[in-house]
Amino acid sequence: MNRWVLGARPRTLPASVVPVVVGTAAAVGASPTGIIWWRAGAALVVSVAIQVATNYVNDYADAARGSDRHRVGPTRLVASGLATAGEVKQAALAAGGVTVAAGLALAAVVGPELVVVGAACLAAGFFYTAGPRPYGYVGLGEVFVFVFFGVVATAGSAYVQLERLTLLAVGASVPVGLLATALLVVNNLRDIPSDAAAGKRTLAVHAGDPVTRTLFVALVAGAYFALPVLALARPAALLALLSAPLALRPVRAVVREERGSGLVPVLIATGQVQLGFGVLLAVGLALSG
């Protein structure tokens, strides 16, 4: 696999694709002009590019702090020697440039408020693991993921279509954000030993192994429990329940107390749950729109 594709962590990218798909679907039927597809495409580019930029910054910053030295998870570019710190920094800037270009195109037709939102997203991605006091190192990473890969990305994708916020889009952002957060939680669960040794005080390190496992199960379950509420507005949102069998594998593995490398397949399976849930939810929202 190409090293830059590897460094972008493609298996985690459903976290940036799903909110755009769901948010766009939530806008179906709410606009007399219908879905403006180029705006949906630009929103998808912005969302994915922000995540890729964040992943490269994370790779660069974690290597600089030495917290990647004994990781069990997917290969990191700098720590493995596949790329230099300077090369990864340039890759992060390039992904950030793509974000800015697509974001400005949207802002030109929707409004300058998108510039503020986009700047906040980029800043949040950078300060997650970089800067003098990265908030990912003090247990706030899950908050970032829920807010930006849940609420902002989902409601924002509907906003670029409708040019207004809707309760449905905000409601749909909740299960999307919960599953994106679950992805980070299982990642941090796997890395508790190495993160603790490196001084990276993630929420998992603060809370400990048993609480983190309970949190993961609660996040996955919470996404499904949110569906009946969404069904009050769009009944076919319940289609997302069909993805529940996909959730059994990662939940069982976490409950069985898989550790270390045994949690790598759980991370992959959680991404599959998020993708399956998101696609089915989007179809349901669109059909009921």
Image (tube, rainbow, N blue to C red):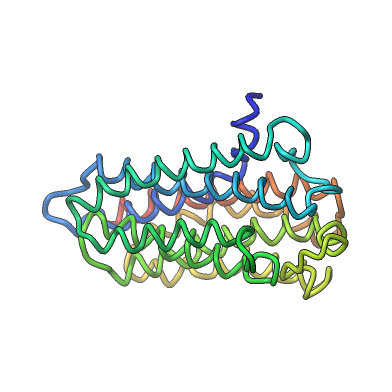
Identify the residue at the far left of this view.
32
| 78 shown above or below 236 | above
Tell me residue 239's x, y (percent). Answer: 45, 54
| 158 shown above or below 140 | above
Tell me residue 152's x, y (percent). Answer: 41, 63
- State left or right for residue 201 relative to residue 3: right
Residue at horizontal 20 percent and vertical 59 percent from the top: 111
Image quarter hosting the C terminus: bottom left
| 120 shown above or below 17 | below
Image quarter hosting the N terminus: top right
Residue at horizontal 55 percent and vertical 50 percent from the top: 54
Camera-side residue: 180 or 192? 192
Tell me residue 178's x, y (percent). Answer: 56, 65
- State left or right for residue 216 relative to residue 172: right
Residue at horizontal 37 percent and vertical 57 percent from the top: 118
Camera-side residue: 137 or 217? 137
Tell me residue 245's x, y (percent). Answer: 64, 51
- State left or right for residue 84 relative to residue 231: right
- State left or right for residue 137 relative to residue 35: right
The tally of labels here is 0
Camera-side residue: 229 or 3? 3
Identify the residue at the far top of this view.
1
Camera-side residue: 44 or 97? 97
User: Which image quadrant for residue 255?
Assistant: bottom right
